[in-house]
Image (tube, coloured by chain):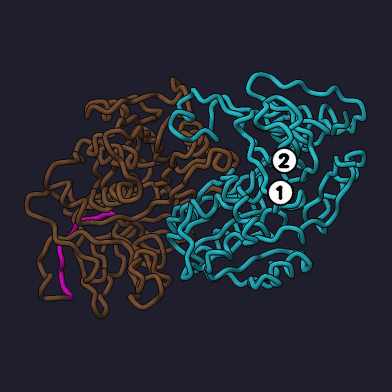
Chain colours: A brown, B cyan
Amino acid sequence: MRALTLENHLQFQANHAQPRSGDGECLVRVRLAGICATDLQLVNGYMRFRGILGHEFVGVVESGSSSWQGKRVVCEINCVCRACDMCLSGLANHCRKRTVLGIDGRDGCFADFICVPEANLHEVPDALTDEQAVFVEPLAAAYQTLSQYPFGPKTKATVIGSGRLGLLVTQVLATTGCKLTVIGRNEVKLSLAEKRGVQAVHVDELVCRGDHDVVVECTGSPAGFDLATRLVRPRGSIVLKSTYAGEQGVNLASVVVNEITVLGSRCGLFSEALDALVREAVEVRSMITRTFPIDQAMEAMASAARPEHLKVLLDMRK
Amino acid sequence: MRALTLENHLQFQANHAQPRSGDGECLVRVRLAGICATDLQLVNGYMRFRGILGHEFVGVVESGSSSWQGKRVVCEINCVCRACDMCLSGLANHCRKRTVLGIDGRDGCFADFICVPEANLHEVPDALTDEQAVFVEPLAAAYQTLSQYPFGPKTKATVIGSGRLGLLVTQVLATTGCKLTVIGRNEVKLSLAEKRGVQAVHVDELVCRGDHDVVVECTGSPAGFDLATRLVRPRGSIVLKSTYAGEQGVNLASVVVNEITVLGSRCGLFSEALDALVREAVEVRSMITRTFPIDQAMEAMASAARPEHLKVLLDMRK
C-alpha cells in the first residue's frame, strides 16, 4: 500500500506492507486524512516517533468486525489498556500504557490502510462529507476547551493563533456567545474569523491591558505564552491547546504574581465534534486550502508547513 | 531611625529619616520582622525595588488613628486604590495601582517605624507572642493554597521545598488530613516536617510515578517546576507558591500532554492565619533559627541566604 513514513527521514513509500488487524481491531481503508502541526513537529523530532505518520482521518471499515464492516468511520487516537489507574479512574485518554495513532508507538493514517481498536471507532452520519468528517479529531480537541472553562456571554476571551487549530477553537468559542477576539499574523486567516463575526486583531496592532478573563493559546510557542500572560487579567485563565515541542522555556513569574490558572488541554469528545458538524455549528470546508493525492504526500507536508496554508488534506480515494 | 535600605546596594542606616503618615495611614513602631526569600530576590534585582526592605512584621501603632493607637498589629502588604476594576471586582490584592510594602513602590518594615494604610491593619490577640505574630503574612500566603485546591483525606499531595515557605505550607496542608509528602534537600529541615507526622523524602531518594493529585511548588526554581510535572498525575494540579525571579524558563510540554492545571498563588487572608496560630493548628516557633538586633541587619540578611537557616528575624525592641 501507499504510505508516508518517518524513519531517519520522511519518505513516501509506494509499496509499504499492508497492516493486519489484531484482536479487537479493525482494518480501515483510509479515504481522506488531515495534516496537523503535530505531524510537522514529529518530523522535527518530537516524541522520537518512527512509523507511518498521521492521526486525523475518515475511512471505511474493510475487515475485522462484522458489525462495523462497510461503515464510514472516524477514530479516536488514544489506544488504551482499560486496566491502569488512569483508565479505571475514567481518564482513559491518559492511559499509562497508551499508544497514539501516528504519534506514539503506533502507525498512523497517512496510508491506504490503518489498523485501529474497534472501541475507538465512531460512525460518520450520512449528512457529513468526507471533507467535514476529516476535521472531527481536531474539532474534538477544540471542544475540549469548553469542558475546561465556563465560557459564557460575559466572558472576555481571546484566541492566540489564527492557524488550523486557532480557527477551530475560535469557532467553538463563538458558539458560547462570549466576547471573543482572535489574534494572528496572517491577514487572510484573520479575515476567515472576521467573516464569522469574530473580532480579529493583527499581533502588531495589539494593546495588552491585562483584562481578558481567558486566553486560549494555540501557537505552542514561548512567545505565544508570554503574550497570553500579558493579555489575561489577574486571576484569569490561560488554556494551552498546542504542544510545546521546543527547548526554549517560558517565564512563570507573572503566573504567580497575578495568580493565573494555566490549563493544559489535549483531546476531546468525538461525539461533540460530530454533533457540531451535523448541526453546522462549525464550518470547516473553507479551512481546506489544498488537497493532495497520497502519492504527493511529501509535497503536501511541505505545503502544510507554509504559513499561507490552513488545512492540507491527503486524498487516498484515487 | 534605624533602617535596612536597598539603593544601589544593601545598606544599614543608623539615622534614616523617620516616615510621616499620610491620610488614612498609621505610623507603626516595628517590634519584630521576618526575612523572606522575596527579600533576598529583591537584593538580586527582582522588581527593581528601591527603598526600605521588609514586609513581614509585628508592631505597635504609634500614631495616626485614635482607634488604633497603642494596639499591637500585623499588616497586609498590598496597599490598594479601591477604585480600579480589580478592587471593584473584589480582587483588591490585584489592584492595578497597588504598592506593596517593601516590595513595590513603598518602604517596608526593616526599620524602627513604618507607615501603613489603616485599612491594612489587623490587631494581634494577646494570646500570641511577637514571635508567632511575625509569621502571619507568610502563613496567610500558605493558607491561600487551601482556597485554590479542594484538599481532603483522599488527596495525595506533595510539597516541594522544605524551606521557610515549604514548611509553613506543609503544616497548613497537614491540617486537612491529606496524604502528604514533603521533598527537600536539608535533613534538619525535613526532620521538622517528620516531627509533625509528615512523610519527608530527600530529593535524591525520590521516585517519580506521576501519581500525585496535587504538588505545591515552594522553591521558585525551574528545577522545582520540572520535578512537579514528573510527580503530578495526568489531570492533576501544580500550585506555584514562589515567585520565579530568574531568566531561566520552564518547559510546558507535559502540562499540555498530561492536561495539568497550574495555579499561581500569592497572598492570603490574615484572619485565617491569626486564627490558626491562636488555635495552635500551626507551630512556628521552632522555625526561628536566628534573631538579630536590627543594628545587625546586614549579618541577618547574609544568614537568611544560607541553606541551614529557616526563619531569620530582625528585632527592633532593643
- Disc 1 marks which residue? B133
Secondary-structure class at tag 2:
strand
Label annotation for residue A153: none
Residue B51 point in image, percent of width and height: 78, 27
Disc 1 residue type?
Answer: Ala
**Mark 2: few, some, or many residues within 10 Å (few <14, many ≥20)?**
many
What is the magenta range? A56-64
In the rendered structure, does residue A61 fall within the stretch colored magenta? yes
- Residue A138 placement, left or right of B132: left
B257, above or below A150, in the image: below
B54, above or below B303, in the image: above
User: On what subunit does the disc labeled 1 rest?
Assistant: B
Residue B256 point in image, percent of width and height: 45, 53
Q: Is residue A248 visible?
A: no
Residue A257 point in image, percent of width and height: 58, 39
- Residue B198 placement, left or right of A140: right
Q: Nearer the viewer, residue A58 or B256?
A: B256
- Residue B35 placement, left or right of A115: right
Tag 2 and tag 1 share a subunit: yes
Seen from this angle, which residue lies furthest front? Answer: B66
Residue B193 figure quarter? bottom right
Q: Earlier in the sequence, mark 2 or mark 1?
A: 2
Disc 2 residue type?
Answer: Arg
Seen from this angle, which residue lies furthest left? Answer: A126
User: CA gap, disc 2 to disc 1?
Assistant: 10 Å
Q: Nearer the viewer, residue A240 or A316?
A: A240
Q: Nearer the viewer, mark 2 or mark 1?
A: 2
Residue B98 figure quarter? top right
Label annotation for residue B72: 2
Disc 2 vs disc 1: Cβ atoms closer than 8 Å? Answer: yes
Q: Residue at x 33, y 26 (%)?
A: A200
**Mark 1: few, some, or many residues within 10 Å (few <14, many ≥20)?**
many
